[in-house]
Amino acid sequence: MTALAEDQIAAAVDGLLAVDGLELHVRTSSRRKRFALTVESDASVTLHTPQGRTEQEAASFVRAHRAWLVSKLGLRERTRPLNPAKRLADGEVFRYLGRTYRLAIASGMELPDQRVRLVAGRLVIGRHQAEDPAVGRAALVDWYCRVGQAWTSHRLQPWAARMGVGEPALEVRDLGQRWGSYRPAEGEDGQGLMSLGWPLFQLPMHLIDYVIAHELAHVKVSGHRADFWRLVRLALPEYEQRRADLDELGRRMWMGTIA
Ligand SMILES: [Zn+2]
């Protein structure tokens, strides 16, 4: 390798570059004409670089964009997901409607139908479920879906009446990172479908109510323009605070990862 080549950012091999205390992942591409920076969701930074550029060129590009980078990183840090992983062990803490419950592993008799349940303030799971992460996770998600469905079914009618909208059908299931969604009715007098993600039911009731009111507003207005938020505000004047609390608490909820 010549001295010049050594000074270049490795043309084929991607690596790390440190500039004034910032560490960047370098990704080199022959199709690229200019440098570019991206901040990833895990708050790592990638420097995209054309082939054949020197480390000095890269460093001065990073320095020129330092202010932008620092503000971007600050934002990422403030909104970064902090979702924990859970162990399927006696005493592990799970949340339901904003309260905490400890997991208890049953020997057998306590769970005749093999379904997770809340017994005397403990969330009880079968031993064979606790021993297999995939089975245990599915059993817990099934529990959240069942209790979430039952809890919301009582809540939906008063909210729909208050907002002057028809009551949609309801399902609670895995929606990935979303708390809720609404699908309009197909025919003239069909029923729309509100879907809620099971992790929502870990949160305090007033935040679940916000998601319910939000999705119910979609019965009347699709999209998130001003008329949509006007409708949400009518039903829930303090919705902005609840939405902020949902963002803040929501990123700390368990999303199904088993440690
Ligand atoms: Zn929406």
Image (cartoon, rainbow, N blue to C red):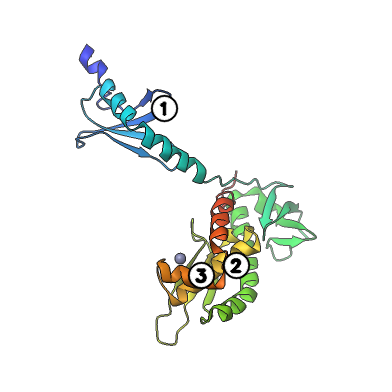
Q: Dot 2 corresponds to which residue?
A: 209
Instruction: Establish if 30 lies above or below 235.
Output: above
**Contact (Cβ within 8 Å) of mark 3 with mark 1:** no
Q: Quadrant of residue 241?
A: bottom right
Amino acid at pointer 3: Val
Q: Position of residue 173 (x, y in %)?
A: 54, 64
Residue 22: mark in rendering? 1
Quadrant of the rendering where the C terminus is positioned: top right
Instruction: Give the crowd class for mark 3: few <14, some 14-19, many >=20 residues within 10 Å.
Output: many
At 65% across and 60% down in the image, what residue appears? 204
Residue holding disc 3: 232
Q: Nearer the viewer, residue 204 or 255?
A: 204
For label 3, the SS is helix
Report the Cα–Cα distance between label 3 and label 1.
Answer: 43 Å
Residue at 41% over, 27% down: 23
In the image, residue 178 lies at what x, y percent?
A: 49, 59
- In the picture as drawn, the residue positioned furthest to the top comes out as 3
Q: Of the residues under marks 3 and 1, which one precedes in the sequence? A: 1
Q: Please report the residue visible at 59 percent of the width from the left and 76 percent of the height from the top.
A: 159
